[in-house]
Amino acid sequence: MSGLLLPERDSNPLSRVYGRTMAESLGIECSEVNITPVLESFGVYEKRDAVVRKIFPDLEPPYKFRLVLPQNLLDTDRLNIYHIEILNADGTNEARTAFGRETSWNSWRRTISSRGRGMTQLYYEAERRYRVVCGTTNRPEAIQGFFVKYGDGGVDIEPIAPLYKNQVYQLGKFLGVPEEIIARTPEPGYIQLRGERRWSS
């Protein structure tokens, strides 16, 4: 068994830390491949930047930005609405709500990232090492189709597909998964929850 970390330019650095922590706790080999060049070849960052400039037409470089969702959506009466926040060179920041087509880039950006990881890099490594690709889709995700076709859904085996999410957490505790990983709010790595302080440029 081996693990493969597949970060890209906008990945949450914590994902790498947690990935290595998990590999160490399982005692498995873990290597890393940066998939930024794959996403660049599709113009992912270019198209993303064009959306930011559309929402902030008077924006002057240099600046940093991030796509943000409210925290604790399941525990509060809040709407699932994206905001794009800008950090200017002078340290000031501004947030604007992104609607409709302005947020559609997030969907194709997520799917192309998933396909770049799954169908490209994971299968390349699996075939090179004579191994199979293992998926992480749980039962609610499988029932709802909440996975990326030919991305995280393109795998050889799905060992936790019969398990509900609370059973996955119980299994994680039983197997000794570090608590900081179990307690972490799920997110795809480049969308941020309000309160985090990561910026893209």
Image (tube, rainbow, N blue to C red):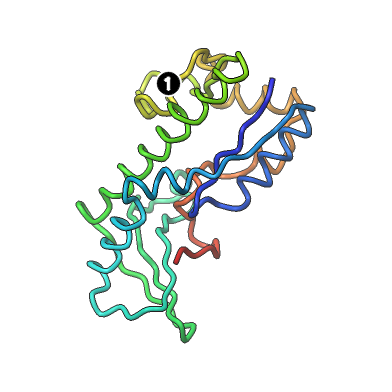
User: Could you tell whether 34 is left or right of 60 in the image?
Assistant: right
Q: Is 88 in front, or is 175?
A: 88
Residue at left offset 35%, top offset 23%: 145
User: Could you tell whether 100 is left or right of 68 in the image?
Assistant: left
**Is label 1 in a helix, a strand or a loop?**
loop
The quadrant in which the N terminus is found is top right
Task: In the rendered view, tell whether residue 15 sits above or below residue 136.
Answer: below
- Residue placed furthest toward the left: 101
Q: Is 178 in front, or is 113?
A: 113
The quarter of the picture where residue 96 lies is bottom left
Residue at left offset 66%, top offset 39%: 19
- Residue placed furthest toward the front: 128
| Labels in figure, total | 1
* Residue 169 image point, x, y percent: 63, 28
The quadrant in which the C terminus is found is bottom left
Q: Label 1 is placed on what type of residue? A: Gly
Residue at left offset 56%, top offset 15%: 132
- Residue placed furthest toward the bottom: 90
Task: In the rendered view, tell whether residue 181 sits above or below residue 26.
Answer: below
Task: In the rendered view, tell whether residue 84 sits above or below residue 122.
Answer: below
User: Pointer 1: what residue?
Assistant: 154
User: Could you tell whether 72 is left or right of 178 in the image?
Assistant: left
The quarter of the picture where residue 160 lies is top right
* Residue 4 image point, x, y percent: 61, 33
